[in-house]
Amino acid sequence: MTKSFIGMPNVLKYTGLVMLLSATSLRAAEIPVPVQNEPHHKVVFENDYVRVVDVQLAPGAKTLYHTHAAPSAIVELSDTTLVTQELGKAPTARHCTARTTSLST
């Protein structure tokens, strides 16, 4: 019977690779994307004056950090609790009821 093992130099190589991939993943998650490039945000109409974005999230779903280039009027279509987080700040939760509107600048 032959035993297989990973020698110490190989373990360090693999550990370094895993650490590098983890650091790269964390770094990529911290870079905000424009809202139109965030996968959960679907632009359904846009012209020179307005952009209408449809956002549908399953319970527990998370979006990428994203930015809005202009102030946003938000209309909640269902009752929900949203947890939002500004980059570098703690998350905050707020309960939204259907037909609630808000403005984000």
Image (cartoon, rainbow, N blue to C red):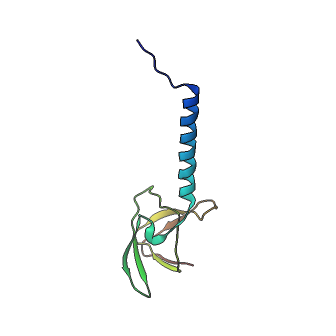
- 37 and 6: which is toward the camera: 6
Quarter of the image for the C terminus: give it: bottom right
Q: Residue at x 53, y 36 (%)?
A: 14
Q: Residue at x 43, y 84 (%)?
A: 50
Does residue 12 lie above or below 67 as drawn?
above
**Tally of numbered tags:** 0
Does residue 29 lie above or below 76 as drawn?
above
Does residue 21 lie above or below 45 as drawn?
above
Tell me which corner region of the image, top left, top right, bottom left or bottom right, holds residue 97: bottom left
Residue 29, image x, y percentages: 53, 57
- 77 and 33: which is toward the camera: 33
Q: Residue at x 53, y 51 (%)?
A: 25
Residue furthest toward the left? 44
Q: Going by the image, does 90 lie left or right of 39?
A: right
Residue furthest toward the top? 1
Residue 7, image x, y percentages: 55, 25
Residue furthest toward the right? 89
- 78 and 3: which is toward the camera: 3
Q: Going by the image, does 15 lie left or right of 42?
A: right
Tell me which corner region of the image, top left, top right, bottom left or bottom right, holds residue 1: top left
Residue 75, image x, y percentages: 44, 76
Residue furthest toward the bottom? 49
Q: Residue at x 55, y 31 (%)?
A: 11
Residue 2, image x, y percentages: 42, 14
